[in-house]
Structures are given as C-alpha cells and as structure tokens.
Image (cartoon, rainbow, N blue to C red):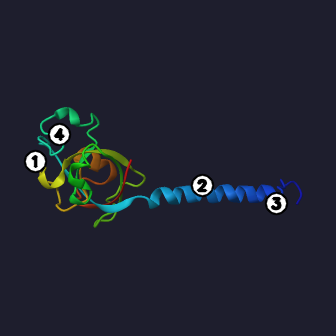
Amino acid sequence: MVGAAMISKSQYLFFQFLIIILLSTLFIHFSQADVGTASHYGPPFLPTACFGGDASQFPSSNMFGSAGEGIWDNGAACGRLYEVRCISAAVPRTCIPGQTIQIKIVDRAQSSVSRPSSSDTSMVLSTTAFQIIANVSASLINIEFQQV
C-alpha cells in the first residue's frame, strides 16, 4: 500500500491480545454482579436495625439503602457498600443510562420504619440514591448490584 502505515504481524497479534485482555476484564467485572430488584423509601429513617437511633450512620451524600432478606445475612450486611445500577423496569426508559451508584446498607428492609415503595425487594434505596439511576415515579426496578 502506498502511504499507509504498515505494522508487523507480531504487532498486530500484540494489539489483538490487548483487546482480548481488555474485553475479558470488562466481562469478568460484570459477571461477578448479582441481579435483583430495588424500590425506594423516604423519611423517617430512624431507628434502624443496624445502628438504632444513631443518625451519624447515614452518609452525608444520602446514598444509602436497606437490605432485603436475600442480602441481610443476619445483620452482617450492616455497613456494607454496594455498587448498584438499573438494568430495566416495567415502564420503558425508566432507567437512567450509564449511571451507577454506591450505597451503604444502614437498615433491614423488612423492619425499616418507613415503608418501601414495593416490598420483597433485594434492596430498598433512599429516594436520593434511587433517582440517580432511575425515574423516581417507578416503584420497582431491576438492578445489577455488587458488594464493593
């Protein structure tokens, strides 16, 4: 070819190898996540099953949630951090594309003072956290979540 940059076969194979490594790293990252559902709730938040009446348990960002029975783990979920993203909902375009949040578990969903928008979910997110990944008018969304 005239004027085209030529690369050797070894350089070509090296670039293919890099692409495969990058793609497999992305695949492995997402394959470790669980799939479940999330709803949302608002105040009052105290007392909680994790920390009682201690208001300092809540992150200043208000990015927190309550653990559903599937992740409650007899209270071991208290204080755990999860990355959460909306993957689908009953109503199209409910999820906000490209948004992932990190929340702290501060309560047990089943015993929270404030009732969630939908029961029997994997986690119940504060309205502040929920509205970053989905339209807050939705009561239930499908999520992908992973402990950090």
Q: CA distance from mark 3 to mark 1?
A: 65 Å
Q: Determine whether, in the image, residue 136 is placed left or right of residue 143.
A: left
Q: Position of residue 95 (x, y in %)?
A: 34, 57
Q: Report how far apart the C-alphas of labels 4 and 3 lie in the structure.
A: 61 Å
Locate residue 120, reporting x and y percent: 19, 62
Mark closest to the chain's N terminus, 2 or 3: 3
In front: label 4 or label 3:
4
Q: Out of 105 and 76, give the one closest to the viewer.
A: 76
Residues at badges 1 and 2 in contact (C-beta under 8 Å)? no
Residue depicted at x 24% and y 61%: 140
How many residues crowd around disc 4 within 10 Å: few (fewer than 14), some, or many (20 or more)?
Answer: some
Q: CA distance from mark 4 to mark 1?
A: 13 Å
Res. 40 visible in picture: yes
**In this figure, which residue is indicated by the disc labeled 2?**
22
The amino acid pointed to by label 2 is: Leu
Residue at disc 1, secondary structure: loop
Q: Residue furthest right?
A: 2
Front in this rendered view, residue 105 or 78: 78
Give the amino acid type for the residue marked by disc 3 in the picture.
Answer: Lys
Q: Amino acid at mark 4?
A: Phe
Residue occupying the point 71% across, 55% down = 15
Write the residue at 63% across / 60% down.
20
Q: Earlier in the sequence, mark 2 or mark 4?
A: 2
Q: Earlier in the sequence, mark 4 or mark 3?
A: 3
Residue pointed to by mark 4: 51
Of mark 1 and mark 2, the one earlier in the sequence is 2
- Dot in front, 2 or 4: 4
The residue that label 1 is drawn on is 113
Q: Which mark is residue 66?
A: none
